[in-house]
Image (tube, coloured by chain):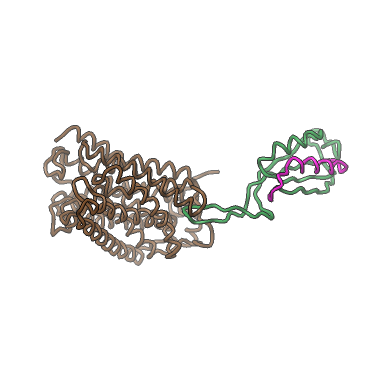
Amino acid sequence: MNSADTSFILICAALVMFMTPGLALFYGGMVRSKNVLATIMQSFIMLGLVSIVWAVIGYTLAFGTDIGGFIGGMDFFALNGVGMDTLNSPADNLPHLLFMIFQCMFAVITPALITGAFAERMKFGALVIFSTLWIILVYAPMCHWVWGGGWMGAHGALDFAGGAVVHMSSASAALAACLVMGKRKGYGKEPFIPHNLPMTLLGAGILWFGWFGFNAGSALAANGLAANAFVTTHLAAAAAVLGWLLVETMHGGKPTTLGAASGAVAGLVAITPAAGFVTPMASIVIGFGGGAICYGGVLLKSVFKYDDSLDVVGIHGLGGTFGAIATGLFASIGAEGLFYGNASQLWIQIESCLATWGYCFAVSWILFKLIDKFYGLRPSEEAEVAGLDVSEHSEAGYQI
Amino acid sequence: MRKIEIIVRPFKIDDVKDAIAGLGLKGMTVTEVKGFGRQGGHKEVYRGAEYQVDFIAKTKIEIVVDAERVPEVIEAVREAAMTGKVGDGKIFVIPVEDVVRIRTGETGLEAI
């Protein structure tokens, strides 16, 4: 066990935990005031729900002894054998419990990311059922494939901090949600305007801050690789703010604050798979490209006519996919991408994107369909128009 | 007596107040209002999606004056509130039957 690494990852786990309430504010500001609490709750509940699911069964499915490259075994069920020392820890410099809780924070925020797709139109009970099953059937296998000894990692796919595990997986579930659930009542006929953009910008700032734990912590040690990931993360987000705003100004005439916040998140998403594999200068290119591409991504929903309330597909889906492919182009630290003479890495990255999208979309789509059939995904029209704060939680966000 | 309702751009409120006070008139009621005239609303853009916002913030000033003073009030307010661009506002003149000062019970011009 290494105490410097241990202290660093303890802090990183706390930083990643803070991203979920940050996401709650980021999303909460973008919905109408009658849905602010319900939207915040959809993220916040994951801290309670997913943490327990993860400790009991999710962790062992992700990091238990490999079964056929697809899933982990039951060795760590209910944290059996996950202790204060490094015994059986996937990171032999960290207490097993610390590795588990660091991974837990990733598991918490991932289903929270999906909620942006169906914000303002899902029953709370349906969300709880979906998220529980999704962690077990989608997230844990994905996590195992990439980091837990599964086939994707063995195949050589590069995913430093979760481009596939976190961002593409949540975005493909988000796309499935949009298609199964349909549009919000009144979508396209009345304006759905963010009710509190300062809240959204604060949330984006917290996400940026927490992302240092997400990416630098994924080095799993307090070392130069962590420093590299910290720097690439920051520079990519910075460049993405500029990339988004440049395209936005050329397209729409003015740089918006929502654009700056969205660009930052797009850059953070794009650098996530690459953070430990690329140089700082490459990260600027990846961030700038991520910001510009995701600006286009959010316009897709008006082209394809689906209602992705808060642009999970456009930002996490496109940003994550772009980042994974860019990793195959720019990787130069610990692996070589196309620009460093290894064309096969790019192909592996593309394969991993297709597998992630295919598996996560299919299982999520089936889950949404089943829950819709047996429980119902959406509240009544009357409840939706009244707002989910009152109809689902008997509360109002603001007393004005 | 006449009630004059003046709808102006919010940033002009101080100029209009000073113009009215410069005529020796005392008292006014000010309300923040929203509406649109010939200029229509304005455009807001969120992540590339444009929304037309129909109602623009304006300030409404209400004063009651002796009917004889209406032309000079209108002139002073126009001068103070005008920018020359679409959206400068409107002035409405409405007959007033009576005015009562609550504290003293005075009525009519005495009560203004």
Q: Nearer the viewer, residue B84 or A82?
A: B84
Q: Quadrant of the N terminus of chain B?
A: top right
Q: Nearer the viewer, residue A204 or A181?
A: A204
Query: Can see residue A23?
Result: no
Spot the residue most to the right: B68
> In the rendering, what colour is chain A?
brown
Give the magenta part as a residue range.
Answer: B64-87
The location of residue A242, given as percent across then percent down, is: 42, 45
Q: Is residue A129 left or right of residue A396?
A: left
- Colour-to-chain, green: B
Asked whether residue A385 is drawn in magenta, I would say: no
The location of residue B18, given as percent across then percent down, is: 74, 34
Q: Quadrant of the C terminus of chain B?
A: top right
- Quadrant of res A86: top left
Q: Nearer the viewer, residue A126 or B13?
A: B13
Tell me which secondary structure the magenta stretch mostly adopts: helix
Query: Can see residue A235?
Result: yes
